[in-house]
Amino acid sequence: MKKVIFYLSLLVWTILFIYPFLWMLSATIRPEQEIGGFNIIPSQITFESYAQVFAKIPIVRAFFNSLFVALTVTTGTLFLCSMIGYAIGRLQFLGRDIIFYLVLITMMLPLQIILIPLYILMVKLSWVNSYYSLIVPWTVSAIAIVMLRQYFQSIPRALIDAARIDGCSELRIIFHIVWPISVPALITVGIITFMTTWNEVLWPLIVIREHNLMTMPQLVTIFAVGGQAESLLGVQLAAATLLALPVIIAYTFFQKYFIESMATSGLK
Amino acid sequence: MKNTLFLPTTFLLLFAACTSDTREAPQSITYWSANNQYEIDLAKVVVAEWNQQHPDFPVQHQPIPEGQSSEEVILAAVVGKNAPDVYSNMWPGDVQLYARARVLMPLNQFADFDSVMQARNSAETLREARSLDGNTYQIAWKTNPIMMIYNSKMLRQNGFDHPPATYSEFIEQAKVITADLDGDGYTDRYMSLLDIRVTWWQRFFDFYTFYIAASGGKMLMQDGKIIFDNPSAVAVFRFLRFLFEKGYCPLEKAQGRVDAFLSERVATRFTGPWEIKHAEKFKPEGFEYDFAPVPVPDDFAGPRYTYGDIKSIVMFKTRQKSQKVWQFVKFLISQKNDYRLLELTTQLPVRKNILQDSLFQNYFVKNPALAVFAKQAEFIRGTDLSAGLKEIFDAISQEYEASVVYGAKSAEEAVKDAAQRARLILK
Amino acid sequence: MLKQVRRTFLLIKTMKILKIITAKFAKNDRIGYALVMPYIVHFCLFIAFPFGFCFVLLFHKWDIVSEMQWVGAGNFYHIFQDKLFFKAIRNTFTFLLVHIPLQIGIALFLAEMLNQKIKFRGFFRSVYFMPVVVSGVVITILWDQLYAQDTGVINMIFVQLGLPKMPWLTSPYLAMPSIAIMATWKNVGIYVVLFLVGLQNVPKQLYEAADLEGASHWYKFSRITLPMINPTMLMVVILSTINGFNLFIEPYVMTGGGPMNSTLSAVLYIYNQGFYFYHMGYAATLGFCFAAIVFLVVFLQRKLVEQKPLD
C-alpha cells in the first residue's frame, strides 16, 4: 500500500513535468478556437500552425544558423580551452598563477557589466550582423578552462613525461595523449558550451539584426513578442515547439550525458 | 616548437582577418518595413515590381527585426552601421534624434523633392514633417487614426442601437454588456479591452488618444512647455480608472491571448484601420463590427480629434547611391503604391484630397469602414517634437499603470506627478 | 643619415635586450605562453577592453549616436535617486525569496524519493530534468499560456478544485512569485540530480547507527541528512541566486517588467535604459553597481553558509 502511494506521487510529479509539454504540442495541432482548457486530445488534427510558421519566418535557416554557431563555439572552446587548461595545469612558466587568477575572476564576472561596452566593441570591429560576434567572443570560456585544468591535473605525470621523452611536442601531447583519456571532461565541457550557446537569447538580440543570420531562440522570441504572429496562439506555440524539438530529441538519445554534465557544472 | 606556435598564430590571424572584413557595398538597396504580415505582403508586391523594372538596382526587403519595440532596433542598426537604406515605419518622434546625429538624409536636397511632395501632401503636412533646422528628413507615409471598433450585433442584441459617444453612454452600456454569462461567478464578457502593458508607446492607443479627443486636439506640449496637467487629462484618467475599477475592462494581458474582440469576449476596442484587415481574415461567421469616434466627456463640444499614429519613410545616409534610393522612395509613395497600401494593409496613405481622388473614391465606396477613417484622418494629431518624448511617455505610462490600472493613486495626483516628471526630463 | 644610424643602433640594442629577456625563460616557458596566448588575446579584447570602456562610460552621458558628454559622478548620484533601480533589486530578492526555498524543498523531496530503492529511477530522473535542457524562451511562451487568467489551464484546474481564479501575471503581488514558480519548474531537475549525488554520498553507517537508537524519520533527516548535504545546499543556493540575478527573458517575454514594475529585473532595467532610452553611460553605471551587489550577496552567502558548523 505504501508502495502504491509512493509510486503514485512520483507519477503525479511526472505528470507535472510532462503535461505542459504535451499541452503545448496539442495546442499546435488543433484549430485555433480549441486552444485552452486542459484536454490535450484534439478533436481534429491540423498542421496549419506549422505551415504558417514555415511561411512567415525563415526558421529552417535559423536552425542551421544556431547549429553552425553552437558547433563552432563548442569546437573552438574544446580546442582553445584544452590548450589553455593544459598550460595552466601542467606547465611551469612565469606568471602562470596570475593568469589562473585572472581566469577565476573572469568566471565570476557578471556579463551585465560588459554587455554594453562589448556591443560597442562589436560595432567597432564591424561584427554586428555577422557570425563573428556570435562566435569569437565565446570561444574562450573561463568555466571550461577551470574544468579542463582540473581534469588534466588528475592525469598521471608519468604518462606525459614518457611522451615528452619520446619527443612529442606539447600540442601532440594535448591532442593525442591527454584528450583520449579526458573524454568525460570533454563531453561535459562540450555539452555545457553547446547548450549555453544554443539557448542564448540576450546577446543575439543585441548584435544580430538580419533575419537570415538570426539564431533560432532569437527568431522565435521576436516572432512571439512582435506582431508577425497575428496574435495566433497556435502559431506562436508551434514556433516554440520547433525551437524545443531539436534539443528534446538530442536529450532523449543522450540524456545520461546531458544530466551528468549539466548537473556537475550546475549550469542551466 | 613551430608546431606549438602554429595554432595560436592561426587564431591571431583569424582575428586580424575578421577585423579587416569590411563588407563590399553591393549594388542593391536594403529596405525595412514594419513586421506585421500585411505590410510584409505589401512590401513584397512593391519590391517585386521595382526589381523587375530595375534589375540593375534591386531592392532587398526585410521586415524590421524587432522585439518589444522597433526603436531599439533602429538605434542599434544605426550604431552598427548596418541601417537600411530605406525604412518605412519610423515614428516621427524619433526623427529629431537621428537627424541631429546626422544619420538621416535631408530629402529636400533632391531637386524634385518639392514638386513631388506638393503633389502628394498638403502644406500643413509638409510643415509638420519639417525638422527644426529647416530640412525635411521624413515623408509622412501612412496614418492610422485611432477609433473605437465595436461589435454592432452585440450592442444591438443588448438594446443599444448606436455606439457610445460619451463617457456616461459608455458606462451605461458597459453595465449591461459586462456580464457573467455562464453563471460560474466570473465575468466572461467585458465592455472593452485596454492593453495593460507599461511599454511607453502603449499609451498612444489609450491615454493619449482619449486625451486628444477630450481636449479637442491638444497635445502634451505647447511652445515647448508641458501643458497636459489639465482637466482633460484628469477626466481621462478618471474615466479609464472607472472602467478597470468596475471590471468593465478585464485586468488581463491583451498580448499572447486569443483575440478577445473577435471571439466576442469584449464589445469594443480602440484601434486603427489595420484592424479591418485582421477582422476580415479571422472573424467568425455572422460577426458584425463597425467604427465610431472615441468617446468624449459628456460636456464636450467641437470637432472630434484623435491620435493619428503617423509613420514616416526615412532614408539613412548609407552608401553612394542616394539618387537611386530616392527613386525607390518616390516609387514607394507613388499613387499606385499608396493605393496598394490602402488595399493590402487597410492603412491610410497620407495623401491630400484622398476622399476626392477617383482611384481611392471607388475603394471607399466599396469599403465604407475605411471611408470613416479617411474622414477621421482630417482631425488627427501626432506627437510633439521633442527628444525627450519617449521618456515623457514612459513617465505617463508609469503613472497610468499606478492610477488607472491598479488604483494606487488618484487621477489628479497621477497627472500632476507625470507632468512634474516630464518637466524634469525636458530640463 | 645620422638619424638612420641612430635608429639602427637603437634597434640592435633593443633586439639584444629582448634576446637577454627571452633567454631567461626556459623552453617550457615559451610553450606555456604560446598555449595561453588565445586566452590573453581574448582577455584583452573581450574582458579588459570592455571593462575599461565601461569605466569610461561610468562618468559620461552618451546616447551612442552623439558625442560623449562628461558628467563626473552624475551617473552615481542619479542611481541613489533612482527608485526603479532599487525596485528592480527588491524584485530580484522577492524572486529569490520564493525561488530558493521552493527549489530546495522540491528538489530535496524528489531526490529523497529517488534515493529509495525504486524501479525506473532513470526514467523519473530524466523526466524531472527535461525542462532544464529546453530553451527558456520556449518555457516562457508556454507558461504564459498556462498562466492566462480566464482561459489558462492552471486557473481551469483551480476552478475544478473549487479555488478562485488567480491573476497570476496581472497582480503586482503575484507576478514575480509566478515567474519564480516557473523558474523553479524549469531548473529543479538540476538540483534533484545534485541532491541525489549528495544523498548517495552520505555514509550508510550513520543511518544504521541512528536506526539502532530508534531515531525517528525526522530526526535522521534533520540530524544526519541535512548536515551531510550542506555543501550541496550551498551550491544550490549560490547557483539559484546567480540565476535569479540574471533574470531577463522571462519578464521580457511575459510581462515586459509590469505590473507596476513588479517583475522588472535588474538586467531588464539595464537593457531598457541602454537600448530603449539610449542612456548608455547610465546603463553601464547600473551594470557596474548591480555587479557589485551580486558579488557582495554571493560572497555573504558563502560566508554565512560555510560558517555553519557541521554537526
Image (cartoon, grey):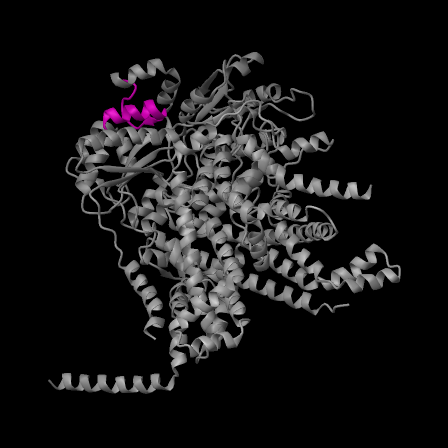
The quadrant where residue B49 appears: top left
- Image vertical order of residue C102 relative to residue A147, above or below: above
Where residue B26 appears, as percent x and y from the top left, is: 21, 45
The quadrant where residue A218 appears: top left
Q: Nearer the viewer, residue C247 or B424?
A: C247
Q: Residue at x 83, y 58 (%)?
A: C219
Q: Residue furthest front?
A: A166
Q: Nearer the viewer, residue C80 or B272?
A: B272
Where residue B186 appears, as percent x and y from the top left, is: 66, 26
Is residue B332 at least partly visible in the picture? Answer: yes
Where does the magenta region start and end? B334-356
- Image vertical order of residue B132 relative to residue B20, above or below: above
Judge left or right: residue C310 versus residue B329: right
Where residue B202 appears, as percent x and y from the top left, is: 47, 37
Q: Nearer the viewer, residue B314 or B182?
A: B182
Q: For the image shown, how many numbered marks are present on the structure?
A: 0
Q: Quadrant of the C terminus of chain C?
A: bottom right
Is C146 magenta? The answer is: no
Is B336 magenta? The answer is: yes
Judge left or right: residue A50 versus residue B346: right
Is residue B426 at least partly visible in the picture? Answer: no
Q: Residue at x 40, y 18 (%)?
A: B369
Q: Nearer the viewer, residue B29 or B109?
A: B29
Q: Residue at x 35, y 33 (%)?
A: B310
Where residue A61 appears, as percent x and y from the top left, is: 38, 41
Q: Quadrant of the N terminus of chain C?
A: bottom left
